[in-house]
Amino acid sequence: MFKQVHHVALVVADLDASSAWYSGMLGFKPERRFGFPEAGVQIAHLVSEMGLRVELIQQTGSSRSPDEGKDVFGALVTQGIKHVGLLVDDIDQTAQELKARGVEIVLEVTAVAPAGVKNFWIRDNSGNLIEINQWLEQEKA
């Protein structure tokens, strides 16, 4: 029935600034922009090299998430979508590249054996959490 995930949606404070952040920091390419002016909504779709689409939404009157200032686990005390998880081949290299670009690292590279991954966490320019993952060696077999 389902072919693939079409997009992950994130509400952001400034569509232009967030589009530039996802392009410059994570390498996403602009795909399309559209909006619903009567509802105060502007939307941008950006796509990664591998086809992951992020939908950035700027809504007039939106406010920051109550999770914005919390750590990755503190955000779990309220229900709803909490983060986007991305998969990479070389987590240490990715962490170094993102640090060099000035990306905020929220939690450094850590092995999470029960999940079968090493991961680290970043925050985008609107405060949204992003989890970067690499499969642990035993998971590749």
Image (cartoon, grey):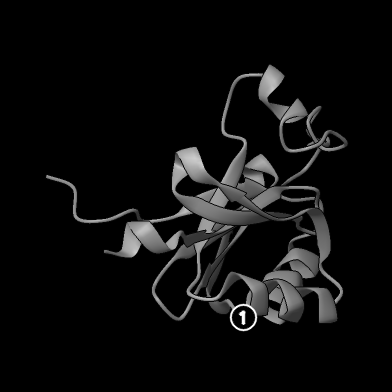
Classed neighbour count for the residue bearing mark 1: other residues with Cα under 10 Å, few (<14), some (14–19), many (≥20): some
The correct choice, above or below, for 7 with respect to 81 in the image is below
Q: Nearer the viewer, residue 87 or 78?
A: 87
Q: Quadrant of residue 56?
A: bottom right
The percent coordinates of residue 22 (x first, y second) are 68, 70
**Residue 40 vs residue 132: left or right?**
right
Image quarter where the N terminus lies is top left
Q: Can you say which quadrant of the picture contains the C terminus?
A: bottom left
| Residue ID at (83%, 37%) | 64
As displayed, is residue 22 above or below residue 122?
Answer: below
Provide residue 75's location: percent of width, then percent of height. 73, 29
Q: Mark yes or no: residue 101 visible.
A: no
Q: Is residue 108 visible?
A: yes
Q: Which residue is mark 1?
A: 27
Viewer-closest of 102 and 7: 102
Judging depth in this view, the residue of 130 and 135 nearest the camera is 135
Image position of 100 (left or right of 95) = right
Residue furthest to the front: 138
Q: Secondary structure at mark 1?
A: loop
x and y, in percent, of residue 82 in the image: 62, 36
Please tell me whether residue 94 is drawn above or below residue 42 in the rendered image. Answer: below
Q: Residue at x 44, y 55 (%)?
A: 7
Q: Which three-letter amino acid code belongs to the residue tagged 1?
A: Gly
Q: Which residue occupies the foreground of this view, 118 or 80?
A: 118
What residue appears at the point 44 percent right and 66 percent down from the top-left corner? 52
Report the number of discs: 1
